[in-house]
Amino acid sequence: MRVLITGGAGFIGSHIADLLADTGHEVVLLDALLPQAHGSSGAPGWSERHRLVVGDVRDRELLASLLSGVDAVCHQAAMVGHGVDPSDAPEYASHNDYGTAVLLAAMHAEGVHRLVLAGSMVVYGEGRYECADHGVVRPGPRRREDLDAGRFEPPCPHCAAPLTDGLVGEDAPLDPRSTYAASKLAQEHFASAWARQTGGTVWSMRYHNVYGPRMPRDTPYAGVASIFRSALAGGEAPRVMEDGRQRRDFVHVTDVALANALALAADAEPGGLTAVNVCSGEPHTVGELAGTLAAAMNGPEPVIVGGARAGDVRHVVASPARARELLGFTARTSFADGVAAFATDELREPAAATG
Ligand SMILES: NC(=O)c1ccc[n+]([C@@H]2O[C@H](COP(=O)([O-])OP(=O)(O)OC[C@H]3O[C@@H](n4cnc5c(N)ncnc54)[C@H](O)[C@@H]3O)[C@@H](O)[C@H]2O)c1
Ligand SMILES: [Zn+2]
C-alpha cells in the first residue's frame, strides 16, 4: 500500500512511518516541521530513511501532487498541547481543522477514499462516572475552590454524592474541554461529513496518553511522562499535581503505530466514521507513572504538589474492547516494560519556541 502520512516527522507519525516501511509499504511523509514541535533544528534524523516532503497540509496544490497514486492517508499532523488562552485558538483551528478540511477536499479531488485520523481521548472530557442513585452521570468542570481545597474527585452533578469511575467507550458523550480538544473533535466531524458525501471510510484512532521514544522533551506541549523524565534527568523529583491518584491509560507509541497499521489495512464502515480507543487497557495513576519512572531512573521520590491545571480532567480510562474487536488490536507493551525503557529512550530535543 502507498500511504501519505501527514505529521510524519512527529512523535507518533514517525513510528507509523517506520512500521509501515518495515512491513513493505511505501510511505510519503508530509510535515511542516512546526517550530512548536521541532524548534529550528529542521527535520529529525529518524525521518532520513523516508521520503519527507516539508510542507503544510493547508497547501492544496502540494497535496494534489502528493496524493496521486496514494491508497490511504494517515493524518497525524496537528498542533498539539492544551493551549494557554484564547489567543491560540486561530492557530489550532487553522492547523487542525482548516488543515483537515483542505486534506479532505484534496482527497476527494484525487479519488483517495481511505482515511485514518489521529483522534484523541480529549474529545470525551471527563471519563465515565456512576452515581449510586443516578446511574451514569456527566460531571461538569471541577470548581476552582474544590481543587484549591484538595477536593479533586468530581461529585454527582445531581446529588453531590461521590462517584465511581469506569471505562469510557467510544459511544460516550463528547465534551471537549479545551481549544485543542474542540479542534480534535471538529476534525472527526469534518471527516465524518466527508465520508457521508463520498462513501469514503474513516477510522478515528482516539489515542490515550501516548509515551515512548522520540516523545518531545519538556515543553509546554509535552505530555506528563516527558515532563517527569526531564525533571528526573535534571536530578529533581517529579512534581505530581492533584493527589497523584488521577487515572489515565498510558499507551506505548509502538502500540499506537501498530493500531494505525491495522486500521490502514482494515475496512471501516463506508460512508461514516468509526472511532476506536487506542489504549493499553491497563489504567494507572499519574502518581504511579512518576513513581515507576523515578525508580527506573534511580531518582528522588515524586512530590505531590496539589493543584490542577484549568480544564484538567480527573480520570479518563478507556475500554480497549472495540479496537480489539474491529481491528484485532491489543497493546503489546506493558506499563512496567514501557516505563522502564522510557528512562533511557531517545527523546526529541526541546523546541526553541515556547509560545
Ligand atoms: N501524543 C499524544 O499523547 C496524543 C494523544 C492523542 C492524540 N494525539 C494526536 O496524534 C497526532 C500526532 O501527535 P504527536 O504527539 O506525534 O505530536 P507531534 O507534534 O510530535 O507531531 C505532529 C506533527 O505534525 C506536524 N504538523 C502540525 N501542523 C502541520 C501542518 N499544518 N502541516 C503539516 N504538518 C503539520 C508537526 O510539525 C509535527 O511534526 C496529533 O494529531 C495529535 O493531536 C496525540
Ligand atoms: Zn447522584
Image: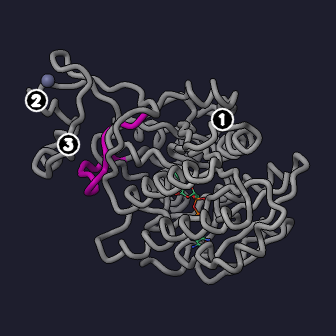
- Horizontal side of 147 relative to 214 (left or right) equals left
**Disc on res. 254:** none
Crowding at dot 1, Cα within 10 Å, few <14 / some 14-19 / many 20+, comes out as few
Q: Quarter of the image containing the C terminus?
A: bottom left
In the picture, residue 293 is in which quadrant? top right
Distance Cα–Cα, label 2 vs label 1:
42 Å
Q: Nearer the viewer, residue 191 or 321?
A: 191
Q: Nearer the viewer, residue 353 or 302?
A: 353
Write the residue at 68% across / 40% down: 259
Residue at the disc numbered 2: 158
- Horizontal side of 310 relative to 83 (left or right) equals left
Residue placed furthest toward the top: 132
Describe the element under mark 2 as helix, strand or loop. Answer: loop
Q: Is residue 288 above or below residue 220?
A: above
Q: State which tag comes first along the sequence, 2 or 1.
A: 2
Which quarter is ligand 1 in? bottom right
Residue at the disc numbered 3: 140
Residue at the disc numbered 1: 337
Q: Is residue 307 magenta?
A: yes
Q: State which tag comes first along the sequence, 1 or 3.
A: 3
